[in-house]
Structure formats: C-alpha cells, structure tokens
C-alpha cells in the first residue's frame, strides 16, 4: 500500500503537466483553425443588421430603441445576440441568448424573448487578394421561450442563404431567408426576409454602410403585408486590444438608424447600437 501511494505521488506532477499540455494544445489548435479559416475569406466587417456572408468568431451584444407611431418607446436589450464560434473548418455555431424587452408601457409586460441557435456553413470563399467573395448557408432554430408574449408564439426553423462580393474597399452582401413554424402556421405565419447591405472601408477603421431590410408576410396575423426599412449606419473595426499581430482579441462597435419606408410598420424608426469582441 505504501509503495502504491509513493508511485501515485510521483505520477501526480506528470499528470498535471500532461493535462496542462492537452488543454494548451486544444486551445492552440482552435486558435489556429480560426485564423486559417478566417484568412480564406475577405475581412469585411459584420454589418449592423444584415447577416455576414462569411463565418466569424466573436461575442456580440446589440441594443435597439424603437419608436412606435404612437411615440411610445420600446427597448430591446441584447437583441437576441450572443456567442459566434468556429468549432470546425468553414463552420460556425451561434448561441443566441434571449433578449430583454422593455416596453415602457403599463399595458404591456416586460420580459425575455426567445432562445435560438444557428448552424452556418461557408461553402464558397476567396479572400480579398484573390477573387474577393464569400457565400454561406445557415439554419437557425428558434425556441419559443419568451415570457409575457415577448417572443414568438411558435417554435420555428429559419434557413438563410447569404452571399457577398467585394470590389476593392467596396462590398455588397445580401441574405434571403424564411421563417418556417414547426406548429400551427396561422399562429405566426411564414415570412421571407431579404436584407442587402453596401459597405465601403474608409481609412483603417471606418465602414460606412447602407442597408435595405425587407420582410414579406404570408398567412398569420400580418398576411399579405410587407415591412421595409432603410438603415444607414457605420461600423468601427477593428480596435486591437493587444499588439501581437497573431492575437485576434479586438473590439468592434457601431450603429445605425432603421427608417420605415413601407406603409405597414410596427415602429417608425429604431436606433441600433452594436458591440462585438473578436477572440
């Protein structure tokens, strides 16, 4: 028994070293994969609203202030964003945390919105030094977990195709997707969302942009209606937090103003503020 204890005591430092090397190796391989995968696509900044046509690894939090036709204010804190991860080559997995909706009205209860996850695959890409384009297909699953009607009435699956092309410092990205309820269709209906953004890089950090955001409703309470916004905005990217060229840790932020251009609009305009940390 004493010999066993002595042998075990001698092995403990070795086991600790092996565990440390294994953990270091895991994170080192992850970082290398993210750098290699990112280098194969253009370095365009993720737009304020429109989904990115590439894959990214970052933490994101958005804040939206909506002004309704009755001049009431609704705050959407986090806007259903969260962690975007690259666990495999050409693949992104997003974990989107429920937002908190503050209505500033005694008639409507505040509460959390839905939880969702996204699986995204980049099937085509060429960096800016080559052909300067990228295209991805993503599938989002939304769980109707919202409280006090602050989320969806049904679970849904949302497939989306996103593609973009660059021309020097200028790029255009567009996404086309749909919302497919898993339960009663008439509860929320089906929607088609079409977003397009034009961006231009100015200097080292500035990315002014203009977006067109359109939603087409089929069945449900808004059957036949169309909702459109024009969203001018700007992104500031990337502010490095460390001087190491290989270190991905950086801060990005920006914002825009959604302006309703359709006769149907639940709110007239909204101020969108977004912040991201790449890692």
Image: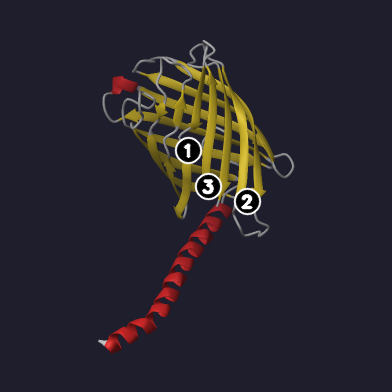
Location of residue 247 by image quarter? bottom right
Q: Position of residue 80 (x, y in %)?
A: 45, 35
| C-alpha gap between disc 3 and disc 1 | 11 Å
Q: Is residue 207 left or right of residue 54?
A: right
Q: Residue furthest front?
A: 2
- Could you classify mark 1 by the number of other residues whose Cα lies within 10 Å: few (under 14), some (14-19), or many (20 or more)? many
Q: Is residue 179 visible?
A: yes
> For the residues marked 3 and 2, what is the alpha-carbon distance in whole angstroms?
25 Å
Q: Residue tagged by mark 3? A: 58
Q: In percent of the image, x 36 and y 29: which residue is there?
A: 146
Which residue corresponds to the image point at 57% horizontal and 42% vertical from the top-left? 276
Q: Do labels 3 and 1 touch, CB within 8 Å?
A: no
Front in this rendered view, residue 7 or 268: 7
Q: Residue at x 26, y 24 (%)?
A: 184
Mark 1 vs mark 2, CA separation in Å: 32 Å
Q: Position of residue 215 (x, y in %)?
A: 46, 23
Query: Residues at badges 1 and 2 in contact (C-beta under 8 Å)?
Result: no
Q: For mark 3, give the secondary structure.
A: strand
Q: Which residue is mark 2?
A: 130
Q: In the rendered image, which residue does mark 1 sit on?
A: 81
Residue 47 shows up from this direction: no
Name which of mark 1 and mark 2 comes first in the sequence: 1
Q: Residues within 10 Å of mark 3 (few under 14, many from 20)?
A: many
* Label 2 element class: loop
In this view, the residue farthest toward the right is: 203
- SS label for mark 1: loop
Where is residue 143 drawn, in percent x and y?
A: 33, 34
Q: Nearer the viewer, residue 202 or 20?
A: 20
For label 2, count other residues whose C-alpha is less than 10 Å away and answer few (under 14), some (14-19) or many (20+).
Answer: few
Task: Report which quarter residue 94 is drawn in.
Answer: top left
């Amino acid at each position: 028994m004493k010999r066993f204890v002595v042998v075990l005591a001698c092995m403990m430092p070795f086991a600790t070293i092996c565990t440390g090397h294994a953990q270091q190796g895991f994170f080192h391989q992850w970082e290398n994969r993210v750098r290699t995968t990112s280098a194969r696509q253009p370095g365009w900044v993720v737009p304020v609203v429109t989904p990115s046509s590439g894959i990214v690894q970052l933490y994101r939090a958005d804040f939206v202030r909506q002004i309704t036709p009755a001049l009431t204010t609704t705050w959407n804190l986090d806007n259903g964003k969260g962690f975007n991860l690259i666990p495999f080559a050409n693949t992104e997995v997003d974990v989107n945390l429920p937002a908190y909706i503050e209505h500033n009205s005694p008639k409507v209860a505040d509460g959390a919105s839905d939880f969702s996850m996204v699986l995204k695959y980049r099937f085509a890409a060429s960096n800016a030094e080559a052909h300067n384009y990228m295209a991805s297909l993503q599938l989002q699953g939304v769980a109707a977990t919202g409280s006090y009607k602050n989320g969806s009435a049904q679970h849904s699956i949302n497939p989306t195709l996103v593609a973009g092309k660059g021309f020097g410092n200028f790029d255009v990205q567009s996404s086309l997707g749909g919302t497919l309820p898993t339960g009663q269709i008439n509860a929320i209906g089906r929607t088609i969302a079409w977003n397009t953004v034009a961006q231009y890089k100015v200097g080292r950090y500035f990315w002014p942009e203009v977006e067109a955001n359109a939603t087409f409703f089929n069945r449900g309470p808004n059957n036949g209606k169309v909702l459109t916004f024009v969203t001018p905005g700007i992104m500031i990217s990337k502010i490095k937090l460390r001087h190491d060229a290989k270190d991905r840790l950086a801060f990005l932020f920006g914002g825009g103003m959604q302006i309703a251009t359709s006769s149907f609009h639940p709110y007239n305009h909204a101020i969108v503020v977004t912040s991201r940390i790449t890692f």
